[in-house]
Image (cartoon, rainbow, N blue to C red):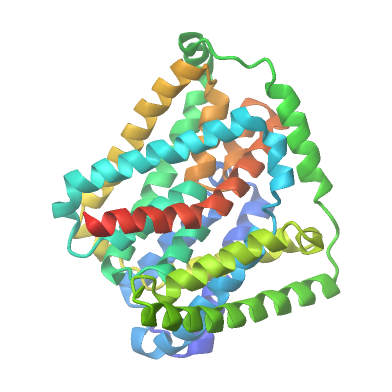
Amino acid sequence: MVITNGFTYIAFLMFVAGALLALEKYTQWKIFNVVPPLVFIYVLNMAFCTMGLYDSEACSTTYSALKNNLLYAMIFVMLLRCDFKKLAKLGGRMVSIFLACSLTLFVGTLIGYIIFKGHLGDNTWGAVAALYASWVGGSANMAAMQAALPVDAGAYSCALALDTVCYSVWIALLLLAVRYAPKWNKITNADTSKLQAVADAAAEEVAKGKKEATSADWIFLIGLSLMVSAVSQYIGGALNESLSQAGLGMFDKGTITTLFVTILGLICALTPLGKVPAVEELSNVYLYAVVSLLASTASIVDLLTAPMWVVFGFFILIVHVVLMFVFSKMFRWDLCMVSTASLANIGGAASAPIVASAYDQSYAGIGVLMGVLGAAVGNFLGIGIAQILRMM
């Protein structure tokens, strides 16, 4: 069987995503605590693509019509959660731990790219930048980079597969590490005296944002986000044309549009728009739709023909662990917060609470806010490292 109809293609993608989410909710299988549905969505759609289930020629029109339009809408809605007044509840220590994780992953990516560049294929800097953006705040940032940068399709497939493999292994290792927290904390002489106070403040802030969404909220937010997507792409094109005439053609339309939507979302998060119910739910709907679309064009064959991508990914994680241990020794950071910050970077707001809750249920709010911080800064850091990688 081959899907050759655009509507059937979208219907099947959303059915797969919905079925996996329903399995997680209603079966409560423990495997979903280690491997979230989003990872299964990646893997299944990549497998279907590899098997030739989606007729690329027939489905490409639908893919092109939806991917960027939904992507920019998703970025805007997702950033409405990023009210920096809420993030202040984390305190300087927690923000420092999060940013240290981002920095160590940055260092690992740069060093790894220098070492493995010749083994990753041609024109891979954009895909590597997309991978790093994903490892600052989750899959939404990786999707954003795919639109913001001239990313080679084959390299992006490898980065997408690598993200899936490394993420699955990483969350399992972080959960296994919980039992060794006392040893880590003893070696680093960790200071946990104020941890519970931060956890309570973060949990209160997260709970404060939980409101019942009505159909009016959903319709307003969908309409607003889609209009923002349309207007942003128009403005991005106009700014790109103006900058090109001014001799700044290195800033292409995708980059400018992504930055514009990101800044607009962060500004709107400080207004009453940031308090509209359904923000969390709609951003997840967009995320699953966009990830499904991207994975449906990524073949596992690309990864199998480039196994050094997997080695590259684990090299980054090794550098990350070593440097975070050094920082923990210097600043007396405990394993709970280091693990939460690490997964907030690599997995995002949906994943970080899993590890935080493994230490204490009341710590989940810290994971959520750290993940939100990653969504806020990931696009900027992704575009920043892209400019460095492009010159290497």
Picture coordinates of residue 239, whole percent (x, y)? 49, 79
Residue 110 to residue 63: above or below: above
Identify the image quadrant of the N terminus.
bottom left
Q: Quadrant of residue 223?
A: bottom right
- Horizontal side of 357 relative to 306 (left or right) equals right
Q: Nearer the viewer, residue 39 or 209?
A: 209
Picture coordinates of residue 76, whole percent (x, y)? 63, 66
Number of marks in picture: 0
Identify the image quadrant of the C terminus.
bottom left
Residue at position x 66%, y 36% from top? 366
Residue at position x 72%, y 76% from top? 224
Q: Is residue 108 visible?
A: yes
Picture coordinates of residue 249, whole percent (x, y)? 34, 75
Q: Nearer the viewer, residue 73 or 376?
A: 376
Picture coordinates of residue 260, whole percent (x, y)? 55, 69
- Horizontal side of 383 relative to 266 (left or right) equals left
**Residue found at the very far left of the displayed protein:** 118
- Horizontal side of 321 relative to 260 (left or right) equals left
